[in-house]
Amino acid sequence: MSKATKHAGIEEQSTKHTPVEKIATGISSFDIIAKGGLPRNRTTLISGTAGSGKTIFAVQFLAAGIEAGTSAV
């Protein structure tokens, strides 16, 4: 829901944000930094140079999801 207001010919948009539901990655330090994990039902790009841990991150995330009883692809 948004509410528009006008001040001196400038329109300002006021919005209320709903909290984003998060999914824990199984990597506790990352989950702390990301305030709970990755956003649920959203696409997240994990990028980095070769050897930076992208595949390990993805495998850990999938393993944590399977242990929690959720489906994983």
Image (cartoon, helix red, strand yellow):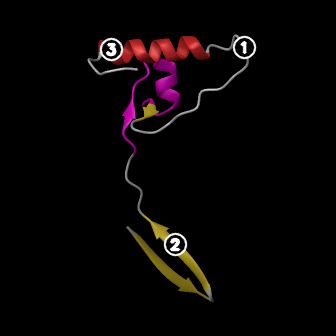
Magenta-colored stretch includes residue 21: yes
Whichever of labels 2 and 3 marks the residue nearer the N terminus, that label is 2
Closer to the observer: label 2 or label 1?
1
Q: Amino acid at mark 1?
A: Ala
- Residue 3: image quadrant is bottom left
Say above or below: 3 vs 67: below
10 Å neighbourhood of mark 1: few (<14), some, or many (≥20)? Answer: few
State how far apart marks 2 and 3 are (Cα): 41 Å
Residue 17 location (% of width, % of height): 42, 56
Whichever of labels 2 and 1 marks the residue nearer the N terminus, that label is 2
Residue at horizontal 37%, vertical 53%? 18
10 Å neighbourhood of mark 3: few (<14), some, or many (≥20)? Answer: few
Q: Which residues are magenta?
A: 20-37
Residue 25 location (% of width, % of height): 44, 21
Magenta-colored stretch includes residue 64: no
Residue placed under numbered mark 3 in the picture = 66
Residue 69 location (% of width, % of height): 26, 17
- Residue 21: image quadrant is top left
Give the numbered dot on residue 13. Answer: 2
Q: Amino acid at mark 2?
A: Gln
Residue at horizontal 50%, vertical 32%? 34
Residue placed under numbered mark 1 in the picture = 50
Whichever of labels 3 and 1 marks the residue nearer the N terminus, that label is 1
